[in-house]
Image (cartoon, grey):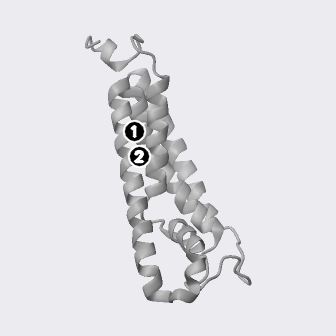
Amino acid sequence: MTRTQLLWWLALPAWLAISLVILRLGDTPGYTESCPLEGPWGCLPPPAALAALHAFWLMVFTPVVAWAILNLDRQRLKRVGAIACTVGLVGLLALLGWAIATWQDWYGELTAWLIGFRLFFLIATSTQLPVVQCVLVGLVLWVSSRMKRVGDPRSPTIARGEG
């Protein structure tokens, strides 16, 4: 077993434990009596549950990001980061575009001034779509591609004899 394989096998239980802890954060007592961000669309779910689900998406992406940083060369890392960031931004724009297009139809002009709150509510509660996390992953990959040195002997392309 190589050193890298050993590190991955040691990191796996830690990753699982952290993921379970993050998901358990959703069970922490939140507010039940009052609703600080209530509008015509309803009440915001408990903040601990939303934070747990958003953080869990980051934990899902963590092994892929770690593998990419360790195994991809600078150019590929930059491309993958740009693709992830673009996918996240397109998803975010589609989500917000849909919200803006349907807002007036559902709630009328009396609530037009609440569009900013509605957009925040939509992004915060759309935990099934990791669009914000995709943007963050893309930025992390792009920044790490900028930090990799060209010609580094530890770079995968140099080690394979491609550089």
The picture places residue 95, in percent across and down from the top left corner, at 41, 67
The picture places residue 52, in percent across and down from the top left corner, at 58, 61
Quadrant containing the N terminus in the rendered view: top left
Q: Which residue is mark 2?
A: 85
Q: Is residue 163 left or right of residue 106?
A: left
Q: Is residue 141 above or below residue 160?
A: below
Q: Which residue: 70% across, 72% down?
A: 30
Quadrant containing the C terminus in the rendered view: top left
Of residues 85 and 23, the one drawn nearer to the viewer in this rendering: 85
Check disc 1 and give the amino acid type: Gly
Q: Is residue 62 left or right of residue 80?
A: right
Helix, strand or loop status at disc 2: helix
Q: Which residue is mark 1?
A: 81
Taking the image as drawn, is residue 62 in sight? no
Quarter location, residue 158: top left
The picture places residue 74, in percent across and down from the top left corner, at 38, 24
Q: Separation of disc 2 and disc 1 at Cα?
A: 6 Å
Check disc 2 and give the amino acid type: Cys
Q: Is residue 3 above or below residue 8?
A: above
Q: Is residue 61 left or right of residue 158?
A: right
Q: Which residue: 61% across, 83% down?
A: 39
Give residue 138's mark.
none
Q: Which residue: 33% across, 13% down?
A: 159
Q: Is residue 86 above or below residue 74?
A: below
Helix, strand or loop status at disc 1: helix
Q: Are marks 2 and 1 in contact (CB under 8 Å)?
A: yes
Mark 2 neighbour class, 10 Å CA radius: few under 14, some 14 to 19, many 20 or more:
many
Mark 1 neighbour class, 10 Å CA radius: few under 14, some 14 to 19, many 20 or more:
many
